[in-house]
Image (spheres, rainbow, N blue to C red):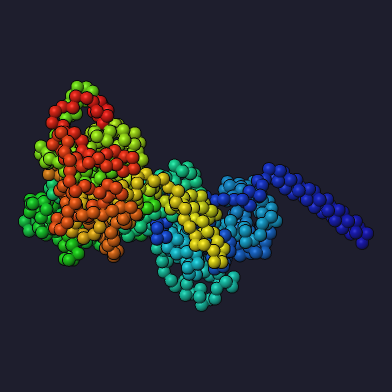
């Protein structure tokens, strides 16, 4: 027994020594690996890259910008069912272990040794947080030790809910989605609160192998893994067996969210917002900062704007004939595959690509480009239709004369005759349309061209073009603001200006006439008379007109020469529409904006377009205090009375002048046409009391649109069609008459007081009403007796230009 005791003592001592040595060794390893472990405090202030979302004015999503598609949700906002699914799939003992799960390690080894079908990972959720945030994904024994040690630290520093929150927002779940919120939206088009058992189980299945569980390429494997997770949830007691079996029987209803600005044909709008955000905050904050942007876009109005512009562009293009097929393919085999390989514009619906299968004198049989499955593969069904001669009458050729078998063209379905189509072609001409609130500058709709997919160049904001006669209202507004009245008489006669280089410039009217004699200032705008405008600009002096053009933001530094009074300087449609808005709102300065408000990831407002101060709006409750008051500190760029006068005159442009095609709407509208030399640019800019709209059309490489091209024929109808849609359900209202304006009945031809048939109500400022008779000066122009308004110029006409004006006047600048 004594020998046995000695042996036992020896073994015990040896074991104790080995244990101590092992403990020392383990401690040494832990100490060695612990020296340079990352600080877990970084998790406390962790701000993951979160995508920026742009909302339209009605709250719908317009666009998202991100390198990683992620929406961050705090733990309290994540439903228990979602948490339970991931815990069952990834870490069943999550709430009981201290960072490393010995049972999980043994279970994973056992399953692996038994050749189990579902390989289980030994990493806990905490270890995955350590790997994703702090350690990295290097495959090595050293990394696993560091990961385990950091997991213990994380568990001691943070609650289970915080750890789970970090995990569920960081984890990659395939198809570019990070975190459960983004995955729920982009796989099922749902919020996390709307997910069913089968849907949360599929998401919880993805962390193991997101690419291998693709719902389109590996559908069966994805369903099998999902069902495994459902079974685990039942085993863990999170759901009943009955609910589990029901969930397993459901198909994998993955319905990827199709988010695109093309939903509202708003590609140009979304890109302009993206560009502004990038310039304001930089790309990092744009793509990772989680900004919430409320845009000014009205989706319904945007669709109307695109429809009106496209119809106008197509109208011009089709009037100039058919240019032929887009492409030619062989239709002897599977024409659907060949046609499907041709890129189609994604924002021209309901237009579709089609190929001619056979053709006769009366019709063509066409095959339509196949759509795509959710997986991105072409559908196998082949759809055909008929293109009758009536659907391509604009080509002025028969189907056989215009098309050949194998020709690829665009077609549009005929809603009145199912199965029949109309021939379409992408217009060679381009243009833009802008619609904004004239009181705030909020842009409701912006179309920068026929198709954003075809060209990203935005003709509304980037195209510098001559506005032509659409600039004239600002010349006449300058005159009205400086002593002229709507009844002031100006000669419509040839005028010759001697320039500094010795050459003579003689402006001509659009009609090519030699002048029609003396007319009122109103007449000069309504009938867009060039000679009257130049004569007026010469009398005013171009430096004054330049100053007004700068006030309205049309030009930054306009050359002070008389040709600029006819709109020869280049500007953008956005600037022109903004300037007209200031006429509509009574002369208040506004800034155009596509963004109402921007909030950071925490909901703090970091930008607001509306800078008006609201006194009393922050009251906690109603306590019989004064009503809240808005303080508008915006600059007054034009006398409100002048603004109304030019508005009234531009109403006459539509009622009696160059834009009478719009008058059939029967609404109070004001505006002005603009046609430049050789009809290279066609404009119409106008407004109702509450909506300002600008239209421009022209070629991207400026060239003449033809001898017959006029803004009245092509641009004004686009404005008319848009206004008919945008104002359809709104009551007509007259323009607001500011205090001080006196409406007097006058003869529109002479500007003298009149009554009865043919007379109009003219707007006059105090003390500027027309006299009962006129005095005459030495030239042939009648001139009212001098009258002054606010210290401005006397309301008279300019001198006759029958002889060359040898003295270089203040209006020429001596440069043109």
Displayed quadrant of residue 702: top left
The residue lying at 43 percent from left, 53 percent from top is 596
Q: Name the image quarter holding the N terminus.
A: bottom right
- Where residue 513 appears, x then y in whole percent? 10, 39
In this view of the protein, which residue sits in the foreground, 83 or 641? 641
Residue farthest right in this picture? 2
In the image: residue 389, left or right of residue 234: left
Displayed quadrant of residue 336: bottom left
In this view of the protein, which residue sits in the foreground, 789 or 253? 789
Q: Name the image quarter holding the C terminus.
A: top left
In the image: residue 302, left or right of residue 779: right
- Where residue 734 appears, x then y in whole percent? 28, 59
- Where residue 113 appears, x then y in whole percent? 59, 60
In this view of the protein, which residue sits in the foreground, 524 or 487? 487
The residue lying at 90 percent from left, 59 percent from top is 5
In the image: residue 596, left or right of residue 347: right
Decide: is 468 above or below 7: above
The residue lying at 34 percent from left, 54 percent from top is 739
Displayed quadrant of residue 257: bottom left
Residue 775 visible, this orientation: yes
Decide: is 593 above or below 725: above
* Numbered circles on residues, count: 0
- Where residue 282 appears, x then y in whole percent? 47, 42
Residue 407 visible, this orientation: no
The residue lying at 51 percent from left, 52 percent from top is 605
Residue farthest left in this picture? 361
Residue farthest top in this picture? 502
């Amino acid at each position: 027994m004594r020998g046995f005791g000695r042996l036992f003592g020896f073994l015990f001592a040896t074991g104790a020594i080995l244990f101590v040595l092992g403990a020392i060794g383990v401690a040494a390893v832990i100490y060695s690996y612990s020296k340079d472990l990352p600080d877990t405090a970084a998790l406390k202030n962790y701000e993951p890259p979160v995508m920026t979302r742009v909302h339209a004015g009605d709250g719908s999503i317009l666009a998202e910008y991100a390198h990683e598609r992620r929406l961050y949700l705090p733990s309290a906002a994540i439903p228990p069912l979602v948490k339970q699914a991931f815990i069952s799939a990834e870490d069943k003992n999550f709430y009981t272990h201290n960072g490393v799960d010995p049972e999980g390690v043994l279970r994973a080894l056992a399953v692996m040794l038994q050749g189990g079908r579902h390989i289980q990972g030994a990493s806990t959720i905490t270890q995955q947080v350590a790997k994703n945030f702090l350690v990295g994904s290097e495959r090595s024994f050293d990394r696993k030790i560091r990961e385990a040690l950091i997991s213990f630290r994380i568990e001691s520093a943070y609650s289970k809910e915080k750890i789970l929150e970090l995990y569920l927002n960081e984890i990659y779940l395939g198809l570019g989605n990070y975190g459960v919120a983004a995955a729920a939206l982009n796989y099922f088009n749902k919020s996390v609160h709307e997910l069913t058992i089968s849907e949360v189980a599929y998401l919880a299945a993805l962390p193991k192998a997101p690419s291998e569980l693709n719902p389109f390429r590996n559908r069966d494997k994805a369903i099998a893994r999902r069902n495994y997770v459902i079974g685990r949830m039942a085993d863990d007691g999170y759901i009943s067996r009955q609910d589990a079996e029901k969930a397993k029987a459901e198909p994998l209803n993955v319905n990827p969210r199709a988010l695109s600005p093309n939903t509202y044909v708003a590609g140009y709008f979304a890109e302009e917002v993206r560009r502004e955000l990038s310039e304001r905050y930089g790309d990092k904050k744009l793509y990772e900062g989680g900004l919430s942007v409320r845009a000014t876009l009205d989706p319904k109005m945007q669709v109307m704007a695109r429809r009106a512009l496209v119809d106008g562009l197509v109208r011009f293009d089709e009037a100039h004939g058919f240019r032929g097929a887009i492409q030619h393919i062989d239709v002897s085999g599977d024409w659907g595959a060949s046609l499907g390989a041709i890129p189609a514009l994604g924002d021209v619906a309901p237009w579709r690509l089609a190929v001619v299968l056979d053709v006769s004198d009366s019709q063509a049989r066409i095959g339509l480009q196949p759509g795509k499955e959710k997986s991105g593969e072409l559908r196998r069904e082949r759809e055909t239709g008929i293109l009758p001669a009536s659907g391509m009458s604009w080509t002025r050729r028969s189907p056989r004369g215009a098309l050949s078998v194998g020709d690829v063209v665009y077609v549009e379905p005929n809603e009145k005759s199912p199965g029949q189509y109309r021939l379409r072609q992408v217009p060679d001409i381009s243009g833009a349309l802008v619609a904004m609130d004239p009181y705030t500058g909020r842009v409701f709709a912006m179309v920068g061209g026929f198709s954003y997919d075809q060209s990203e160049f935005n003709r509304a904001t980037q195209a510098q073009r001559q506005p032509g006669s659409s600039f004239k209202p600002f010349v006449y507004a300058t005159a009205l603001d400086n002593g002229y009245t709507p009844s002031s008489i100006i000669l419509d006669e040839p005028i010759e200006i001697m320039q500094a280089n010795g050459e003579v410039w003689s402006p001509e009217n659009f009609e090519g006439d030699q002048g029609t004699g003396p007319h009122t200032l109103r007449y000069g705008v309504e009938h867009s008379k060039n000679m009257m405008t130049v004569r007026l600009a010469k009398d005013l002096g171009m430096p004054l007109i330049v100053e007004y053009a700068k006030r309205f933001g049309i030009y930054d530094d306009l050359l002070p020469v008389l040709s600029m009074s006819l709109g020869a300087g280049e500007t953008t449609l956005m600037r022109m529409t903004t300037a007209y808005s200031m006429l509509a709102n009574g002369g208040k300065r506004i800034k155009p904006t596509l963004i109402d408000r921007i909030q950071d990831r925490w909901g703090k407002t970091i930008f607001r377009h509306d800078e008006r101060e609201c006194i009393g709006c922050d009251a906690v409750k109603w306590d019989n205090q004064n009503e809240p008051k808005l303080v508008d500190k915006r600059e007054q760029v034009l006398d409100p009375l002048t603004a109304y006068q030019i508005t009234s005159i531009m109403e006459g442009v539509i009622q009696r002048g160059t834009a009478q095609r719009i008058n059939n709407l029967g609404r109070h509208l004001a505006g002005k046409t603009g046609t430049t030399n050789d009809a290279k640019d066609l404009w119409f800019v106008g407004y109702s009391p509450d909506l300002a709209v600008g239209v421009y059309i022209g070629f991207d490489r400026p060239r003449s649109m033809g001898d017959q091209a006029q803004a009245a024929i092509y641009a004004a109808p686009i404005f008319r069609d848009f206004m008919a849609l945008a104002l359809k359900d709104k009551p007509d209202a007259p323009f607001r008459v500011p205090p001080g304006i006196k409406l007097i009945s006058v003869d529109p031809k002479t500007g003298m007081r009149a009554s009865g048939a043919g007379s109009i109500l003219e707007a006059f400022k105090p003390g500027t009403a027309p006299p009962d008779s006129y005095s005459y000066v030495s030239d042939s122009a009648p001139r009212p007796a001098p009258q002054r308004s606010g210290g401005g110029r006397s309301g008279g006409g300019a001198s006759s230009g029958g002889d060359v004006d040898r003295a270089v006047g203040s209006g020429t600048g001596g440069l043109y």
